[in-house]
Image (cartoon, coloured by chain):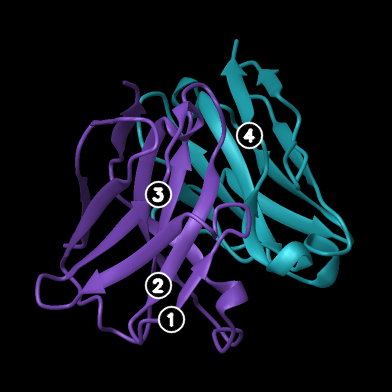
Chain colours: A purple, B cyan
Amino acid sequence: HLQLQESGPGLVKPSETLSLTCTVSGVSITSSSYYWGWIRQPPGKGLEWIGSIYYSGSTYYNPSLKSRVTISGDTSKNQFSLELASVAAADTAVYYCARLFCDGANCYSYYYYYMDVWGNGTTVTVSS
Amino acid sequence: QSVLTQPPSVSGAPGQRVTISCAGGSSNIGAGHHVHWYQQLPGTAPKLLIFDNINRPSGVPDRFSGSKSDTSASLAITGLQAEDEGDYYCQSYDTSLGGSRVFGGGTKLTVV
């Protein structure tokens, strides 16, 4: 049974680095069939794409966050992680990890992958 | 300001049909990128509802359907039920400014 579980500090100080981990169970993150991604949702607002990683280590980031974001994978623990540097109050949000999948003839391109399984999310507050 | 534009809210009575629109442009939906829809019930994580414009994942009732035309897409819900109340998001890929997945601002569905 596939499950994704986010973990990490719930409180981060302004200007510090936010670090979260997504632990995946039920499928290997080294599978070439999937990408693994992060999405966030500020309180009372909509969803924002952060970025993703492929089993090869290739990463893809939202251009608006690219200068501050690093996504990495730990195959020995079947986990992938998010680091967001120089955080501010605007980075306060629920952070979700998700599996990206593609079903069909278009799966040769990263564009066509969608989030088919989500974690429950973890709340991160940026405050001193 | 979201790249994809959705109405902030829609409402309907039980049993009725509602539609939620998702307006994009030439660098996303109009460029041929697929539209996916997610349902977020109160206090829960988003759940995939429609993928590749029109397809339902296993377990999603056929009361939910998606369509796409030119630079926009729509989600239709028939036979509205109280448990459908929540937020709905469209998502696509945008090739401008370096390329990224993009979401609509979300639509709150109220079953009155």
Q: Please, what secondary structure does the residue beneath circle 2 have?
A: strand
Residue A31 drawn above or below residue B106: below
Spot the residue most to the front.
Answer: A15
- Do callouts 3 and 4 mark residues in contact (Cβ within 8 Å)? no
Asked if residue B97 lies left or right of residue B12, the reply is: right
Q: At 72% from the left edge and 36% from the top edge, which residue is drawn? A: B20
Secondary structure type for disc 3: loop
Badge 1: chain ID: A
Q: Circle 4 sits on which residue? A: B106
State whether discs 3 and 4 lie on one chain: no
The chain under label 3 reads: A
Q: CA distance from mark 3 to mark 1?
A: 20 Å
Q: Residue furthest left?
A: A76
Pinpoint residue A59: horizontal percent, then vertical percent.
Answer: 45, 74
Discs 1 and 2 carry the same chain letter: yes
Which mark is in front, 1 or 4? 1
- Are discs 1 and 2 less than 8 Å apart at CB? yes
Q: Which residue is mark 3?
A: A85
Label 4 marks which chain's residue? B
Local secondary structure at mark 4: loop
Asked whether the residues under the numbered discs 3 and 2 touch, taking CB atoms below 8 Å apart as contact, a structural biologist would say no
Q: Is residue A32 above or below residue A37?
A: below
In contact (CB < 8 Å): disc 3 and disc 1:
no
- Alpha carbons under labels 1 and 4: distance apart: 29 Å
Residue topped by disc 1: A58
Q: Residues within 10 Å of mark 4 (few under 14, many from 20)?
A: many
Q: Nearer the viewer, residue B102 or A59?
A: A59
Q: Say which quadrant the N terminus of chain A sits in.
A: bottom left
Residue at numbered disc 2: A53
Q: Earlier in the sequence, mark 3 or mark 1?
A: 1
Q: Nearer the viewer, mark 3 or mark 2?
A: 3
